[in-house]
Image (cartoon, rainbow, N blue to C red):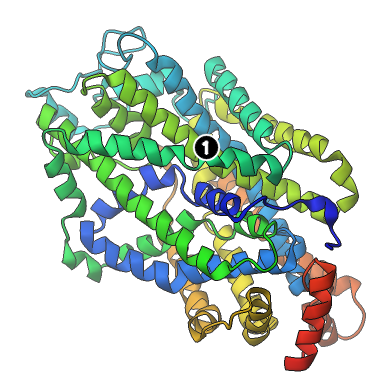
Amino acid sequence: MSSDKGRGSWASKTEFILSCLGYAIGIGNVWRFPYLCYRNGGGAFLVPYLLMLVLCGIPLFFLEVCLGQFSGTGCVTVFKIAPLLKGAGLAIVVINYICTSYYNVIIAYPLLFLWKSARSQLPWENCQNDWNTPKCMELNAGAHTQLLMNNSLLGPSERWRTPADEFFHKEILQISDGIDTPGGIVWPLFVANVVAWVVIYTCIINGVESVGKVVYFTATFPFVILAVLFVRGVTLPGAADGIQFYIMPKWDQLSNMKVWADAAVQIFFSLGPGWGGIINMASYNQFKNNTKLDAILIPIVNCGTSIFAGFVVFSVLGYMSHQTGLPVSAVAAGGPGLAFVTYPEAIGMLPLPQLWACLFFLMLFLLGVDTMFVQTEAIISSVLDVYPWLRASKRWITLGSCFSMFLLSISCTTRGGLYLLQLFDWYSASISVILVCIVEVVIVGWIYGVGNFARDIGFMIDRPVERYWIVSWKYTTPIILTFIFFTTIIYNTEVRYDGVAYPGWAIALGWTSCLISMICIPGYAAYKLITSKGSILERIKANLKPVDWGPSDDLQRTLWKSHVEMNYEM
């Protein structure tokens, strides 16, 4: 019998796998990976990408799943394994709180597009709307396309804009001139944000019991939509040109260190380690679940989905190129520009554009809410694990958490909200999440001991841990994470959006949002050392030893202790 009866668990292994897939497969698989692939050598990019998956992505995913499942606890209390570094768990909560607040506004965008798409003509098909400016230019095969290609030479206010560009920025966002002119609240966006938060709260109100049921739809239906869009895309004229542009190998790019850095960063952020979500989801597993199979299957499906999404995106961009006369390189984009400008523009050229628009934006919404489920639940579970007496009021804790993050997200629903969102996205988690993962692998590989951890996993899954995992956790993964950490800093340029530079105070705010979480790690360590007794060396050693570490299930804990005594010394 578990010593923590009120915590809950997955009703089946399927719920855990679907939740992990929904968490790992997000909007970034659609708007980031395809662009990175074409920009970094096409098919050649798959070499560093898959290599990083094997050397870093899968081992790190397996490590976090094992930490959560073995301890049966969330991303803060799991650091009982090395109490001095519990600040990494606090950093995770801070990162999630900041990022989840603004991320919800991103999934509000598809809701507005869905609402606007339900009409006889898509509102971004032409320049005859109230929000259009004299700089609006409809895409067609003609001399005007050359002007669009020269946009990079013009300032933000001088550029020619497509109808979809102006629809997104002028109608959906009603965007201001910069972050220093926030303007008022954009009320349709505010309402969409409220609706998104209500959906999130309704789905996680009962924790894993409700999330486990919802993911049967939210985690699987995007694959159905993706398959439908793929069939539609590859049957279009010009699709082959777009796909060729996407995957054509440029082998000379492999000598560029930036390509390897992009591959490592994409694997890292695509799988989602360091955010606490993986640890938290695994903590609800049955203790004897075979984590090894899960940790291999889920990252492979995630990466396969990213590659497949590239075919979906670039087949339609090839059609767009065919229809307008613009080269594929001129229409390809990454980030929000791909999801909310370029792809909608291409959809507008298809027969039955309303159908394809609704399917695409429903897919984006579902991809987003799956990630939100996990990140929000990670915050709530962390609070309840630290203060288990609050579990009787879990619904109120959930409501309070969602409402407080909703209040924080309101700032991103103003006319300058996208600038603020871009700022947080650029700085808040890009470095701090990597640092959290470095702390995790150092704890397992060098402090608790990779041999001890392998022993624990072997006891848990009744299978020996192969040398591949041991070498990865002790050497390979820490080295690659260190590489990612420093390359992220080196290649981190000052944030911009649509050519608009940010003022110094905004950049300082961005770095502050990053440092707030990172400071938790040394800050908590200093607190533990100050409040402990003995010499500095004695305090450090005492606080690096595991405290109350082991399975949360009483029976398994007893058996594990006997296993430890028979095999190794703690």
Graded by Cα atoms within 10 Å as few (under 14), some (14 to 19) or many (20 or more), the crowding at tag 1 reads few
Residue 369: which quarter of the image?
top right
- In the picture, measured across the screen, residue 11 lies left or right of residue 106, that is right
- Apparent side of residue 477 relative to residue 228 in the rendered image (left or right): right
The answer to which quarter of the image holds residue 226 is top left
User: x%, y% of residue 254?
Assistant: 24, 68
Residue drawn at 25 percent across, 23 percent down? 162
Vertical position of residue 2 compared to residue 497: above or below: below
Relative vertical location of residue 60 with respect to residue 188 in this rendering, above or below: below
User: Can see residue 465?
Assistant: yes
- In the image, 433: left or right of 390? left
State the image coordinates of residue 263 (x, y, percent, origin top left): 36, 62
Label 1: element kind: helix
Count of labels shown?
Answer: 1
Instruction: In the rendered view, tell whether residue 266 sits above or below residue 29.
Output: below
Which residue is found at the position 13% from the left and 22% from the top? 140
Residue 505 appears in the picture as rendered: no
Q: Relative to 503, is 113 above or below?
A: above
Q: Nearer the viewer, residue 131 or 280?
A: 280
**Three-letter residue code for mark 1:** Phe
Q: Nearer the viewer, residue 562 or 504?
A: 562
- Residue with the mark numbered 1: 217
Report x, y in % for residue 151. 22, 33
- The percent position of residue 307, horizontal first and vertical second, equals 31, 52
Q: Quadrant of the N terminus?
A: bottom right
Quadrant for the C terminus in the image: bottom right
- Residue at 52%, 25% (x, y): give it: 181
